[in-house]
Image (cartoon, rainbow, N blue to C red):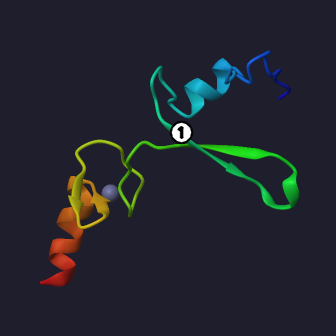
Amino acid sequence: MIVKIDSIGRITVPQKYREEFNLKPDSEANMLPLPDGIGVSLFRLTPRCANCGEEKGLEKFDNISLCENCKKILKYAIM
Ligand SMILES: [Zn+2]
């Protein structure tokens, strides 16, 4: 998809992608350069479960977020 950069360097993330990747106003994203200087990628910074990707009901353990379901699974796996 082609987007234009405005006079002060802004781009608009197309609605299709805002919806697909749940990008809301004031969402934070990480922009990283791609290899060989071909461009950049944008990554949403919404916390997710490290095991399944769920975004709701997360609890942090050190630097890892886990959802309720995965927390239960791991609890039984450790016991
Ligand atoms: Zn999970």
Under tag 1, what secondary structure? strand
Of the four image quadrants, the one with ligand 1 is: bottom left
Residue 79: name its quadrant: bottom left
Looking at the image, residue 18 lies above or below residue 62: above
Residue at 47 percent across and 44 percent down: it is: 45
Question: Within 10 angstroms of label 1, few (less than 14), some, or many (20 or more) residues?
Answer: few
Front residue of this view, candidates 51 and 36:
36
Front residue of this view, candidates 44 and 66:
44
Q: Where is residue 53 in the image (x, y as percent from the top left)?
A: 42, 53
- Dividing the image into 4 quarters, which one contains the N terminus? top right
Question: Which residue is labeled 1 in the image?
Answer: 29
Report the residue that reaches farthest toward the front: 8
Q: How many marks?
A: 1
Residue at 21 percent across and 63 percent down: it is: 71
Q: Is residue 8 found left or right of 46 in the rendered image?
A: right
Looking at the image, residue 59 lies above or below residue 14: below
Report the residue that reaches farthest toward the top: 7
Q: Position of residue 7 (x, y in %)?
A: 79, 15
Q: Where is residue 41 in the image (x, y as percent from the top left)?
A: 70, 45
Q: Position of residue 60 (x, y in %)?
A: 23, 58
Q: What residue type is labelled 1?
A: Ala
Front residue of this view, candidates 47 and 77:
47
